Amino acid sequence: MASIDVYGQFADMGQPTSDAILSPALCRAARGYLDWTQADLAEHSGVSRSTIRDFEGGRHPIHRSTEAQLRLAFERSGIAFMRADCACVGVYADK
């Protein structure tokens, strides 16, 4: 499980990581797994629905702090993200 430092960066095992892990496709996949709408994710994360819509639609990237809010909402609901040796990123249920 990732923790978030005061700068909005993820710190895994105490080491900050600056690499974005949440892509638009992974965001949609995680929402789909939870059967959440964009409005549901907005409510759980505190990120506006329009920001989520624009990110998932590839209109613009998101800030690290916004990614942190989205990931935290997913992780609190049992979704985990993993990075594989092949530089692939995936989503799975943690519970």
Image (cartoon, rainbow, N blue to C red):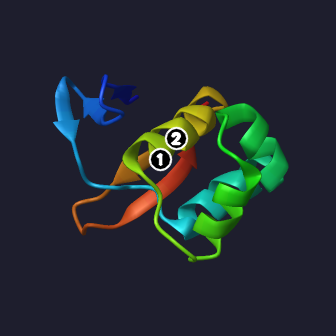
Residue at 82% in and 43% down: 40
Which residue is drawn at the image coordinates 46% and 59% (left, top)? 90
Residue 70 or residue 88, whichever sits in front: 70
Q: Which residue is painted at 26% across and 54% down in the image?
A: 19
Q: What amino acid type is highlighted by mark number 1?
A: Glu
Q: On the rendered structure, is 66 left or right of 15?
A: right
- According to the image, label 1 marks what residue? 67
Circle number at residue 89: none
Tell me if label 2 and label 1 are in contact, CB under 8 Å: yes
Above or below, 49 relative to 2:
below
Q: Position of residue 66 (x, y in %)?
A: 50, 44
Please, what secondary structure does the residue beneath circle 1 have? helix
Q: Residues within 10 Å of mark 1 (few under 14, many from 20)?
A: many
Q: Dot 2 corresponds to which residue?
A: 71
Is 27 drawn above or below residue 24 in the view shown? above
Where residue 29 sits, quadrant-wise, is bottom right
Q: How far from the left and from the top, in percent, is residue 32? A: 75, 57
Residue 1 vs 90, above or below: the answer is above
- Circle 2 crowding by C-alpha within 10 Å: few under 14, some 14–19, many from 20: many
Q: Nearer the viewer, residue 1 or 17?
A: 17
Q: CA distance from mark 2 to mark 1?
A: 6 Å
Q: Is residue 36 visible?
A: no
Q: Amino acid at mark 2?
A: Arg
Specify the quadrant of the image occupied by residue 7: top left
Residue at 22% x, 61% y is 85
| Residue 87 in sight | yes
Is 51 placed left or right of 21 in the picture? right
Q: Position of residue 95 (x, y in %)?
A: 61, 30
